[in-house]
Amino acid sequence: MINRWEVQETNEMIQKEHLDVRTITMGISLQDCADEDIKKFNQKVYDKITKKAEHLVKTGEEIEKQFGIPIVNKRISVTPIGIAAAGCKTDSYVSTAHTLDRAAEEVGVNFIGGFSALIQKGCTIGDRILLNSIPQALAETSRVCSSVNVGSTKTGINMDAVKKMGEIIKETALLTKEADSIGCAKFVVFCNAPEDNPFMAGAFHGVGEKDTVINVGVSGPGVVKKAIEKARGEDFETLCETIKKTAFKITRVGQLVAQEASKRLNVPFGIIDLSLAPTPAVGDSIAEILEEMGLEATGAPGTTAALALLNDQVKKGGVMASSYVGGLSGAFIPVSEDRGMIEAVQKGALTIEKLEAMTCVCSVGLDMIAIPGDTSSATISGIIADEMAIGMVNAKTTAVRIIPVVGKQVGDMVEFGGLLGYAPIMPVSTFKCDAFIQRGGRIPAPIHSFKN
């Protein structure tokens, strides 16, 4: 039973503490669109997406208006195109990317994810076509997002794919250089990618999912920060209890929205992703939460411990509030999307190396990091390999969304706009790893992966 005090508290969180539902994402299977003819396949894809998601945006807006809960994004994820289009006799999936873009525009969503491949152990012909299509596809579309899973705890790391990822990122950066290489902001490399992630740019509709499903991602760094301000000077037990209770309240809001969207659209409810996703707005920052815990700046000694505590308590509080928690769920640390992270980089407190350490205990990985445009593809692949190793060994999802901004050097600023924010160009190691990346093959799965 919801009482008047709880309604008032939720209104306070929305109006003053930046609580929102970050995204309603409809997952749509494209497996039944298979066709040898790429034109027929594209038409089937367009028809299915525009039919299934016809009322998605309108429904989200109605829920937002009725309950007074901001719903920032309405999005779509589809079956990885490397799988869905595998039967097409073609040498490029760029036309399919254009189809996805047109469908997304038609139904009014801001992003559509799933121009993706799952190649943690090796590539099929369809996967190779997909990989070769990514740079052009991202350069010529505005709403299409792409992701590639190159490793997992059960299979190890596909180092041939890791090498290819560095090359794809460099090419994408070059093709979108007139817009500060923004194409790279729509591309993510994963280890242990989840099949039900509602957040972009890494969302795709897993092959084990229902035909259509509604996944909701909540957010609320500002709410958590406000709550722990009241626990200043208290011990860690009190701090943990405060975060848990707050995460519970945030997730309940997401659960309400998810159930309403599912019912009104007549689409099964999938999961709530209870990730704390920051924005460039003041007071909506993960870094500010860590600093409220007692750090002078994010990146100071103790940062990894503080982030581990936050991530764990968010999960513990959130899982009590929803029957189905999934996706990434925890705390995101994207540099360009978090004002506190940006300021920490500018102060010299936060480096890529420290961010890498933090990814051992957070929900994703190296996210929205801008680096010099002349960084080599091998160095980018080396950064990806390190992050994939963290995910593989620790049996967790890790990811890399890195942007070598053509024409920019360390100390420059780059503006992406909207939720993507802005970022300082961060330095990377000048020591080379080319010979390591050139070896090829696979890094085997860790010994503790053998659990059958």
Image: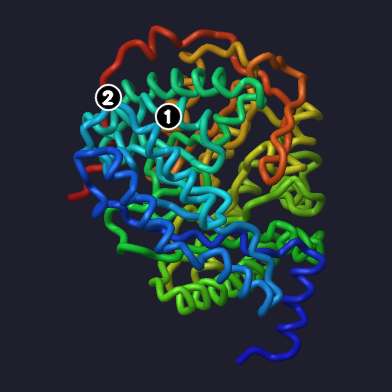
Quadrant of the snapshot with the N terminus: bottom right
Residue 26 place in picture, x, y as percent = 45, 61
- Residue position for label 2: 442
Q: Is residue 347 left or right of residue 164?
A: right
x then y, percent, for residue 384:
46, 27
* Vertical relation: 385 (above or below) 373: below
Q: CA distance from mark 2 to mark 1?
A: 22 Å
Q: Quadrant of residue 65?
A: bottom right
Q: Residue at x 68, y 14 (%)?
A: 407
Looking at the rendered structure, the secondary structure element under dot 1 is: helix
**Relative to residue 104, is residue 63 drawn left or right?**
right
Tell me which residue sits at (30%, 64%) in the image: 210
In the rendered image, residue 55, in percent from the top left (x then y), is placed at 50, 68
Residue hosting label 1: 134
Q: Is residue 393 visible?
A: no
In the image, taking residue 324 as reference, residue 240 lies left or right, namely right
Along the line of sight, the residue nearer the viewer: 236 or 34: 34
Whether 85 is drawn above or below 94: the answer is below
Mark 1 nearby-residue class (10 Å; few <14, some 14–19, many ≥20): many
Q: Residue at x 49, y 59 (%)?
A: 25
Q: Earlier in the sequence, mark 2 or mark 1?
A: 1
Q: How many discs appear? A: 2
Q: Amino acid at mark 1?
A: Ile
Q: Nearer the viewer, residue 141 or 393?
A: 141
Q: What secondary structure is found at the residue carrying circle 2? A: strand
Residue 290 seen in this snapshot: yes
Residue at left offset 34%, top offset 35%: 151
Q: Amino acid at mark 2?
A: Arg
- Height in image: 213 above or below 278? below
Residue 248: percent from the left, percent from the top? 60, 71
* Image mark for residue 203: none
Closer-to-camera residue (199/220) = 199
